[in-house]
Amino acid sequence: MNQEHMNQDDRDQDIRDQELRELYQEVIIDHGRRPRNFRRVEGASHCQEGFNPLCGDRLKLYLRLAPGEEAVIQDVAFLGEGCAISIASASLMTECLKGKTRSEAETLFQGFHQLVTVGGDSVHLGKLRVLAGVRAFPSRIKCATLAWHALQGALSGGELTQGVGERNQGETGPGTQGWVSTE
Amino acid sequence: MTLPERYPSTGLEPFGEFDVEARRKDFPILSRRVHGKPLVYLDNAATTQKPLQVVDCLQDYYLQSNANVHRGTHALSEQATQSYEQARDRIQTFINARYREEIIFVRGTTEAINLVAQSFARPRLEPGDEILISAMEHHSNIVPWQIVCAQTGARLRVIPINAAGEIELEAYPALLGPRTRLLALTQVSNALGSINPVREMIELAHERAIPVLIDGAQAVPHLPVDLQQLNADFYAFSGHKLYGPTGIGVLYGKRELLEAMEPYQGGGDMIIRVSFAKTEYNELPYRFEAGTPHIAGVIGLAAAINYLDGIGLRVVARHEQALLTYATEALSAVNGVRLIGTARHKAGILSFVMQGVHPHDISTILDQAGIAIRAGHHCAMPVMDFFGVPATARASLALYNTFDDIDKLVTALHEVQRLFR
């Protein structure tokens, strides 16, 4: 093998190592291992399951919105299982959503989607930017967006007539209350 | 029931060292790099790489003799037809089928099982009848039966497995009931690697006049299969897990059963005479091969079988078993790694989970080191549920894998742990 080829391989390897470190930053490992807001929301007004049938990652997102048009998200939490990326992304999302209105949440979703697909931050994503490294791993983008798809599903669905804590306790997976898929 | 010995020796198999480095040269893809690292391909249960002998054969076919089969009266069509039918003979001898017309070309194992579900099982099932499968089946040996159960009112019953990922043989005889109409069982589990004692299980089913379909997708690349000895009524496998092309597979069916079955798909090639009033179907095997078949695939599959037989499946099996033993020890020694599927009789499949790290994260980090494994549910969600894991990482072996491949896998797993510490 000639020197030039070796150097190219070394460069490829360096780039990839750097990309990997960016993907698995400490914040992501931490949130993946100890997700914040990992619980049900008592008296939730919205609930949505997200499921990635390709890999089996699944989560259930709970929201409590104050009534009214410009209602803010009073509480948001989730339960589920998945890889570090999907759990960390869900955890970070719940931290960012509290106090946001529906339209602010929608703007964040668009901004986050842009961050992990084409790159760039046009909406001040704050700490969500730690997930920018996902962009270099196309097969993992769906992991990062799973919780966000569940959020969209929750907000576009109707309000629950009773607290979700009372039904399907602890269950996640398709078929309990309808679900969104990243497929 | 008791388990058979792993590989009964005939005393006839060729001995001597298997030259893995020489064989690796047959697979040019193995010398490429991924992310700057030499490729370590350990996703063979998903699909194997293809040797030059197969790739050249496909190229030759398209460059020299491409034409439709069973139709033309010109030279090319005659050549293509001859190669296509010779491939059928080759596959007949490979699995030791009694008759050549028992070899039906299909897209793959999945299509073969669906064919049997719809053409054999469906017209024969009554409400309350039972189809028996096992708890370690691939979705392709579950869902076709669920569909046919929904169509007919039949019920699906499941032979349980134990914590090692072996069939619960004590529970099996009682599940062969008066309403059991078919046993559909995998020979080797794609998610666990377990080798099932299918010959003994078939014998017991036959004592009660129950026909048996064997999913051989993960078996044919790893162990010699002799259908006259095995005595399965149906046997399905895919070409692409056998060093052959994608999109081609085989359904073996006993002639008397195939003859009594309705066609699966209608179209060209599967008819003798068509009028608007009535259609007369063609004889076996053509009755089940509607439309222009995957001619190149069939010829390529025969080339793959020639290649594999040239090495000898017993030689391949011995090499893979040595790797499996080595890898089992090496992975077990990695802190926090738990093997899923520890059957006494296993083919070269190592499913595992790692404490605190999801299989997808393992797979992404391994990929960065040039190592290709599979992470996920392996189209066997009931198996994942049984073991209480959402997914596993799976390294699966082929004849071209080396001890060095296993060492690299273990080194990369330590890297995973370092990142997630």
Image (tube, coloured by chain):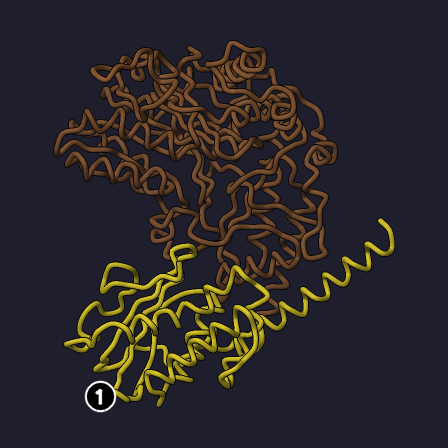
Chain colours: A yellow, B brown
Q: Residues within 10 Å of mark 1 (few under 14, many from 20)?
A: few
Above-or-below relation of B367 to B174: below
Locate residue B54 relative to residue B107 in the image: left or right: right
**Farthest residue in the right direction?**
A3
Q: Residue at the location (60% across, 15% down)?
A: B12
Q: Residue at the location (26% across, 73% down)?
A: A47
Q: Residue at the location (43% across, 39% down)?
A: B189
Image position, residue A100 (x, y; %) = 36, 87
Q: Residue at the location (67% across, 49% down)?
A: B39
Q: Amino acid at mark 1?
A: Gly
Locate residue B251 relative to residue B7 in the image: left or right: left
Above-or-below relation of B86 to B358: above
Which SS class for mark 1? loop
Q: Which of A159 and B213 lies nearest the eye of the viewer?
A: A159
Locate residue A135 relative to residue A51 in the image: left or right: right
Image position, residue B125 (x, y; %) = 18, 28
Location of residue A65 (image quadrant): bottom left
What quarter of the picture does the C terminus of chain A occupy?
Answer: bottom left
Does residue B421 show up?
A: no
Location of residue B263 (image quadrant): top left
Above-or-below relation of B320 to A88: above
Image position, residue B114 (x, y; %) = 32, 32
- All told, the count of numbered labels is 1
Q: Which of B410 and B285 lies nearest the eye of the viewer?
A: B285
The chain letter under disc 1 is: A
**Farthest residue in the front direction?**
B276
Image position, residue B396 (x, y; %) = 55, 43
Q: Which of A149 and B305 lies nearest the eye of the viewer?
A: A149
Disc 1: which residue: A68
Does residue B283 show up?
A: yes
Q: Which of B292 and A134 lies nearest the eye of the viewer?
A: B292
